Amino acid sequence: MAESRLRFGTQSSADVKLFLSGPGDEKYGRNPVYLHSQILKRLKCFQSRFSNRWSSDKSTEMRVTTSHNFDHYLKCIEIMYGEHVDFLSIKECLAILLVASEMSADECINKCMRYLEAVRWSAEEKMQILKVLSCEGLKLKILPDLDARLHWDNDDDHINFVEKIIQEMVSLIKCSGLSSYRNLETVEKDLRGMLEGNTSRDVVEVCGRVLLQEFKASVDSRDFSTLTLLFNLIQHCDGGILEAALKAFCEDVEFMKDANNLPCTEAVFDIIMWFMKATGDGKIIISRASRVSFLTTWLPIIGTFNYNRPFRNHISPIKKLKEFDKAVLSVVLSLPQVDQKRICVLLVEVYKLNRIDMAMPFALSKFLLKCAHSKSTAM
């Protein structure tokens, strides 16, 4: 019978009964699967295992144990029949590609690659595709169009082009003469889009690098308004960029020298709060010395903030003070007791100097009083 007339699973014309089982002896629920020797002959795995049976005109029973998903295994064979078979997702296609590689099913391998080349990927899915295709044990020959799509984002010209675009976008954010808030909002939205979703990892890294360069430049120029905008974007990068931004902010020697002369604006307050939260939550990992340096430098400054006026967006001062209380305590509790007492004594002085009521029912206030009392008792 001509191969073009054969149909997967057709019992009346099948000369092979396939019984599938898994490595734990679990059985495929629809055994047997009716197949045709004319199709299976094209699969090298069957040729080597059952070559002595193809000369027989009688129906043949075969028992196969596979570690793959039964549906993926059979879908690979079904594709060999030349029938139209849809992939449900990239994940399923990659799973079937692994089966096809093991079975040396060239038609199925090519169909999988054509599907991968034609559909939209997320950045995570691209990494999964690269991982499977680059697996040394598979020895897959990647279709040229798929290879071109996979590696175009790594092209130096493309990366340079993307970097130039991002620099132009960031310059709009830094432009003090930008009159339209809607334009600024659009730029921020577009940049965030480059840091998440379907953007390639190469573009995310370029975007993060440009943002960090601009952030450091804003630290040098003491431009806290721009720092606030850039930090909103940096939070969408990975922890490495966030940690680098923190170091640029709190470990710059020249910056630290005149930090005490800086006015504590709401932008400064927000940045300090962001850093404390990220440090306390473990989103960034910095040394004990850096945590102590950060607190001792910036707490006296942030303590001078005027809590008697509403914040922007009509956030009440008491709510903001509670956030400050929680953020500081999260960092303080990450330190050894000797550092805790040192920071707490500093905070008590800051609270008193700025007439912040330590009797308020905040966790930090109670902790400060406890530590201060403990220190004075020990003395």
Image: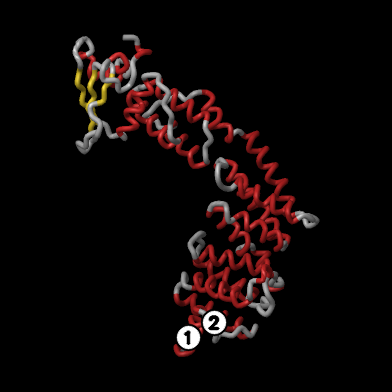
| Residue occupying the point 32% across, 19% down | 43
**CB within 8 Å, label 2 to label 1:** yes
| Residue occupying the point 64% across, 48% down | 191
| Residue occupying the point 54% across, 66% down | 277
Q: Badge 2: how crowded within 10 Å, few (<14), some, or many (20+)?
A: some
Q: Tell me the quarter of the picture where residue 206 sits.
A: top right
Q: Position of residue 213 (x, y in %)?
A: 66, 52
User: What's the amino acid at mark 2?
Assistant: Val
Identify the secondary structure beneath mark 2: helix
The residue lying toward the viewer, choosing from 2 and 234, is 2
Q: Is residue 102 above or below residue 263?
A: above
For disc 1, the marked residue is 375
Q: Tell me the quarter of the picture where residue 227 sits.
A: bottom right
- Tell me if 117 is positioned left or right of 10 in this view: right
For disc 2, the marked residue is 345
Q: Position of residue 267 (x, y in %)?
A: 68, 66
User: What's the amino acid at mark 1?
Assistant: Lys
Q: Is residue 360 above or below residue 125?
A: below
Q: Earlier in the sequence, mark 2 or mark 1?
A: 2
Inter-mark Cα distance, 2 to 1: 9 Å
Q: Is residue 176 above or below residue 314?
A: above
Identify the secondary structure beneath mark 1: helix
Q: Position of residue 270 (x, y in %)?
A: 63, 67
| Residue occupying the point 52% across, 83% down | 361
